[in-house]
Amino acid sequence: MALNKTILNENKDYWTGRASGYSEINQEELRTSQREVWRRELKTHIQRQFPNRDAASIRVLEIGTGPGFFAILLCELGYDVTAVDLTPAMLAEARKNAGVLSNQIKFMEMNAEDLFFLDHSFDVILSRNLTWNLPHPEIAYREWKRVLKPGGLLLNFDANWYHYLYDSEARAGYDADRCASEAQGIEDRNIGHNFEIMEQIALRVPLSNVMRPSWDRAVLSKLGMEVSTDVQAWDRVWSAEEKVNFASTPMFLVHAVCAGGAV
């Protein structure tokens, strides 16, 4: 357990250092067509699960909000939004990016594997690019399911980040992405300040060395959730630059529903 606490602290330190730079990425998403692309994606899934509910009556929890991109979109769509993150520096960026909406979003510092909420507190849980670097992702999923209401919806957008550290074919794809980004004059988001620190963390967390989303499907099914996965989600939600940058590591969607009717 001490090792995993160390990983959590290293994660917190790393993302504290990345907070302002990562916030700039979210700010760009908010300025461009990505804002509407993701609004449409999130609204489609939530409305499909709760077709007869007013947005304001739907309690949504975003886990690992970072600089607040999802939380801002969800608030704009009229949902009752709570957003948590392990890193205070990220939450500070999120509040700043939310602007006048910051008073409507409940931003809270919290560990994704140890939520403070009561059982069955939320209708929807969302996350993006978080589960891959958790020390105990199975515990996290158990917690997320615990705080979802019967009929509640889990949407997790993630990818097989850092699998290239274990797999030669994935490494070849990763290297090809770097060459393609340089050849097309695209800013490479896989290189930069202290990037090697995250590689070292990725070598010590469990999900870098497994193939997903099959792992997610198995774990969530074991928890009694109805699970489907969409390995083409990247094609709907990524910008043209992301499709070059991360071509060998496509984003997938894990879609899971708690037992019981939608309420």
Image (cartoon, rainbow, N blue to C red):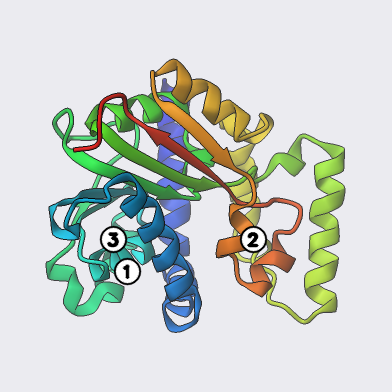
- Closer to the camera, 215 or 168? 215
Q: Which of the 4 image quadrants contains residue 93?
A: bottom left
- Closer to the camera, 24 or 263? 263
Image: 50 above or below 111: below
Give residue 213's position: percent from left, percent from top.
60, 35
Mark 1 burial class by Cα count in 10 Å: few <14, some 14-19, many 20+ = some
Identity of the amino acid at label 2? Asp
Secondary structure of residue under mark 3: helix
Q: Nearer the viewer, mark 3 or mark 2?
A: 2
Identity of the amino acid at label 3? Leu
- Closer to the camera, 200 or 121? 121
Q: Which of the 4 image quadrants contains residue 184?
A: bottom right
The CA distance from mark 2 to mark 1 is 28 Å
Give residue 114's position: percent from left, percent from top.
28, 31
Residue under label 2: 235
Asked whether the residues under the numbered discs 1 and 3 touch, taking CB atoms below 8 Å apart as contact, a structural biologist would say yes
Q: Residue at horizontal 32%, vertical 54%?
A: 47
Residue under label 1: 93
The CA distance from mark 3 to mark 2 is 29 Å
Secondary structure of residue under mark 1: helix
Question: From where the camera sits, is residue 251 visible?
Answer: yes
Q: Residue at horizontal 34%, vertical 32%?
A: 113
Taking 39 as reference, is 7 left or right?
A: right
Q: Quadrant of the N terminus?
A: top left
Precedes in sequence: disc 2 or disc 1: 1
Taking 214 as reference, is 144 left or right?
A: left
Residue under label 3: 91
Give residue 188's position: percent from left, percent from top.
69, 70
